[in-house]
Amino acid sequence: MSQTLEKFKQAIVDGDADGSVTLSETIVTRADATAEQIIDHLSAAMEEVGSRYETGEYFIPEMLRSAEAVERSLAVLEPYLFERQQDQSGVVVMGTVKGDIHNIGKNIIVSALKAAGYEVHDLGVNVSTTKFIDKVRQVDADLLLLSAFTTSTKPAVLEILSTLEDEGLRDHLKVISGGASHSPEFAREVGVDGFATDVKSTLAVCRKLLSD
C-alpha cells in the first residue's frame, strides 16, 4: 500500500486528476491504509505543490490542476475515511473568511477532522461574519476554525471575534485560525485561542483546546 500512497501523492503533485481518482479507488478497495496515512499523503502533496509555486516552478494553472485532483480524490475517499472515524470528538464549524476564496487546504483539513471523529460543518469560502455566528449558535459548536490564507484577512478575523464577544458566545467557544501565513504573532494580535498551519497542527491544537 505504501507504493500506492506514494503514487497517489505524486498524481496530485502532477495535477493528474484521473490518476489520483483511480488510485483513490484502489486505496478504498484494498482497505488497508489508515485515515492518518491517507491524510498525511494528501497534506504532503499539497505542501509540495505550494513549495513549487513559491519557487516559481508552478504557476496558477498547475495549482488549479492539483486542486482538482484533490477535490475529485476526496469525493472517493471521504466515505472511506468517515467509516474509520473514532468516537465523537466535538462539533466544529469551519470556513474560509470573507475576502478569501482559498479552499484546498481547508478541504483536506475538513476530511481529516471528520476522520478523527469530529462533527464538521463546512461553510465553504468567502464566509460572512453573520453566517459564521449563525452556524455556531445553530449547532452549539465547540470549535470555530477560521481559514485565512493571507494576512490581509486579519480584519475579517477580528470582526468575527468581536461579534462573538458581543453575542455572548466567546466564553463557550474555542477559536482557531489557520493558513500558510499564520504565526504565533498573528494569533496573539487577533486574540484567537490557537493557530495552525497544516493538518497535523490543526488536529493537535483541536485536541489540546478541547482537553483543557
Image (tube, rainbow, N blue to C red):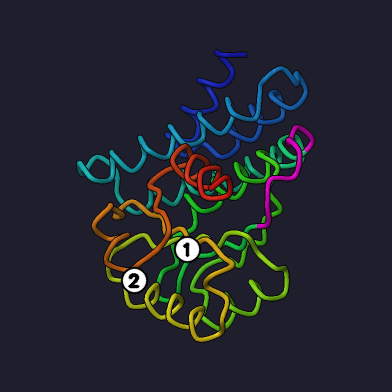
Q: With respect to residue 210, does 96 lie above or below? A: below
Q: Is residue 165 above or below residue 2?
A: below
Say left or right for 33 vs 148: right
**Start and end of the magenta stretch?**
83-91
Q: Locate residue 56: give its quadrant.
A: top left
In front: 106, or 4? 106
Q: Earlier in the sequence, mark 2 or mark 1?
A: 1
Instruction: Residue at 51%, 35% (x, y): give it.
Output: 42
Q: Main secondary structure of the magenta part?
A: loop
* Secondary structure state at the residue bearing disc 2: helix
Dot 2: within a 10 Å radius of its alpha carbon, few (fewer than 14), some, or many (20 or more) residues? Answer: some
Q: Residue at x 52, y 61 (%)?
A: 174
Q: Identify which amino acid the numbered label 2 is placed on.
A: Thr
Is residue 39 located in the magenta-colored stretch of the structure? Answer: no
Q: Amino acid at mark 1?
A: Leu
Q: Find residue 93 and report its horizontal and vertical position in percent.
A: 61, 63
Instruction: Describe residue 12's horizontal placement relative to residue 55 as left or right.
Output: right
Q: Quadrant of the N terminus?
A: top right
Position in image of residue 196 (x %, y %): 40, 49
**How far separated are the C-alphas under marks 2 and 1?**
10 Å
Judging by the rendered image, the residue that carries numbered circle 2 is 153
Question: Which residue in the rendered view is the most extreme toward the left?
Answer: 55
In front of the other: 143 or 150? 143
Residue at which label 1 appears: 146
Q: Is residue 153 above or below residue 165?
A: above
Q: Compared to 74, does 186 lie above or below? A: below
Instruction: Please say whether residue 89 is one of the residues in the magenta stretch.
Output: yes
